[in-house]
Image (spheres, helix red, strand yellow):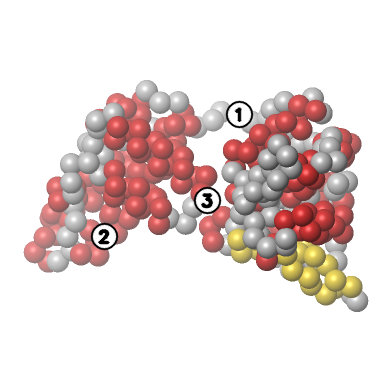
Amino acid sequence: MTTLATLPTTNQQHILTAIDAADLADGTKRHYKRVITEYAAAGHSLADAAALATYAAGLSNSGRAHLKAAVKLWTRGMINQVKGGVTPGDVATAQAAVMRFEALQEAIHVKAAAGQKAHTWLTLKQVKRLVDATPDTVAGKRDRLALSLLVGAGLRRDEAINLTFEQMKLQPVKGKLRTVLQIHGKGAKDRVVPVSDRLAALLDEWSAVCGGKGLVLRSVGRRGDVGESISDIALFKIVRRYGRAIDKPDLAPHDLRRTYAQIGYESGVPITQISKLLGHSNVATTQRYLNLDLDLETTISDFVPL
């Protein structure tokens, strides 16, 4: 039976392995692994709840939140492992181990945000200005498509950078074919996102540049040579660059996803449909952005002026 006492002095590798195996977005894993690595580098043990609490108190609220979530993910798995291996002869030892793991979970206190956070949504005119700001170059065409996938299909940043041409599908609806994206979303939840004819055309045009295989979004060199992939930081910078062009210097990729939802809501798309298109587990999550079957005939992307 595994307990805190039977683990090595430093538990960094245990928790990093647990994070890698978790069903989380790549960006989330990076945040969790970073705070754990920094904690271990400071010479602290994850078996020491007091040291964990003291260290966390010196972090920003977001840093504490990431550290708390990472520790909770790891300890939850360890508690299950202890419970699964307990025998009648070591119940007391198992109970003590569970209590110590629970103490680690409770060692970090994260201050809940007060009030309501002001998010950014773009108007239809601002969306049009945003995508029209992209130049008619190879990099500009890539940027237009990147922005369009966020605001015209509601993709998360990780979903956009990991989207492949193979995830583009054609679905029949009322005598014609609609392009849809088969998205592998957060929490291993797949969903189908129908897109407008204009966004489908942008995908087809870029496919001709990239050869129609592999990742959709790619790096572009100074001479217009197309690479193999793009990082989430690079996508963030693309959004910021064009945000500045429309006097929205703090524009972030998630703001475009919120805008997608808001445009859909204001255009009369049912909130249950919006929730499904965004890949939310419940409508309450969608409501913070602002059970019908997926409608392939009318979709949010049709109303976005790309």
Query: Helix, strand or loop at disc 1?
Result: loop
Read off the residue under disc 2: 81
Residue occupying the point 54% across, 30% down: 113
Q: Residue furthest front?
A: 223
Name the residue type under label 1.
Gly
Taking the image as shown, residue 306 lies to the left or right of residue 180, namely: right
Q: Do callouts 2 and 3 mark residues in contact (Cβ within 8 Å)? A: no
Q: Nearer the viewer, residue 130 or 166?
A: 166
Q: Do callouts 3 and 1 mark residues in contact (Cβ within 8 Å)?
A: no
Residues under labels 2 and 1: Cα distance? 39 Å
Res 139 → quadrant: top right
Residue drawn at point x = 80 percent, y = 65 percent: 179
Q: Give the image location of residue 235, x and y in percent.
A: 65, 41
N-term mark: 2 or 1: 2
Q: Nearer the viewer, mark 3 or mark 1?
A: 3
Report the amino acid beneath label 3.
Ala
